[in-house]
Amino acid sequence: MKTLYIARHAKSSWDHEGTTDFERPLNKRGHKDAPRMGTVLYGLGARPGLIRSSAAMRAITTARYYAEALEYPAEKIAVDAGMYGAGPIELIDIVATFPDDVGEAMIVGHNPTMHMLAYRLAGFEAENLPTGGVVCVDMDVDTWKGIREARGRVRYFEYPKKHT
C-alpha cells in the first residue's frame, strides 16, 4: 500500500504590490495555520518518506512547516517548478516516478489541481480543498507507478478551520 498526502499551500498574501503570483508569500494566517496543520498530521501518524513541493514561494514555505512538524529534513524537500500550473494528470505522472521504497509521500501545491487530483485518485467529494487543507489517500498498490490505474480511498481530510 502507498499513502499520498495531497496538500494545498497555506493562506497566502495579496498585499505585496509588484510581486508575481509565483512569488506570493504566506500571510499571517498562513504562517499560523501551516505549523498547526503539520502538528495535526504528525498526531495522525503522518510520516512521509518524501515531500515534493511546487516551486512557488507559498508552497515551499508550507512544505517547510510541514517538514519540520513531521520530522522530515527540510533540505530533502524536492522542489519542482513543473508542479506550478500542472494539471492532475501531470501530478500523477510526477508521483508515479517516486521511489517504491517510499511508502508515504506528500505533495504540496495549488488549487484547483490538488482538489482535482484528490477527486481523480480517490473520489474526494468535498466542495473545496481549502488553503492549508490536506487529503490523505491510501492506494492499494505496491508501486507508485500503479496509481495511474488504481482507485484509492480517502483516509482523512484535515484543514485549518477544523482545528480552530
Image (cartoon, helix red, strand yellow):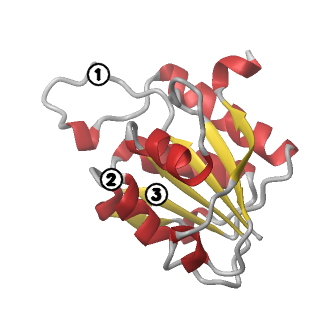
Residue 123, given in percent of the width and then of the height, sits at: 59, 43
Front residue (pair 145, 106):
145
Q: Is residue 142 left or right of residue 60?
A: right
Q: Is residue 119 above or below residue 14?
A: below
Residue 42, given in percent of the width and then of the height, sits at: 81, 47
- The tag earlier along the polypeptide, 2 or 1, is 1
Q: Residues within 10 Å of mark 3 (few under 14, many from 20)?
A: many
Q: Nearer the viewer, mark 3 or mark 2?
A: 2
Residue holding disc 2:
87
Mark 3 and mark 2: Cα distance apart in space = 14 Å
Residue at (40, 42) in percent of width and height: 110
Q: Amino acid at mark 3?
A: Ser
Q: Residues within 10 Å of mark 2 (few under 14, many from 20)?
A: some
Residue holding disc 1:
14
Residue at (59, 32) in percent of width and height: 125
Q: Is residue 12 above or below residue 43?
A: above
Residue holding disc 3:
53
Q: Amino acid at mark 2?
A: Gly
State which quarter of the image contains the C terminus: top right
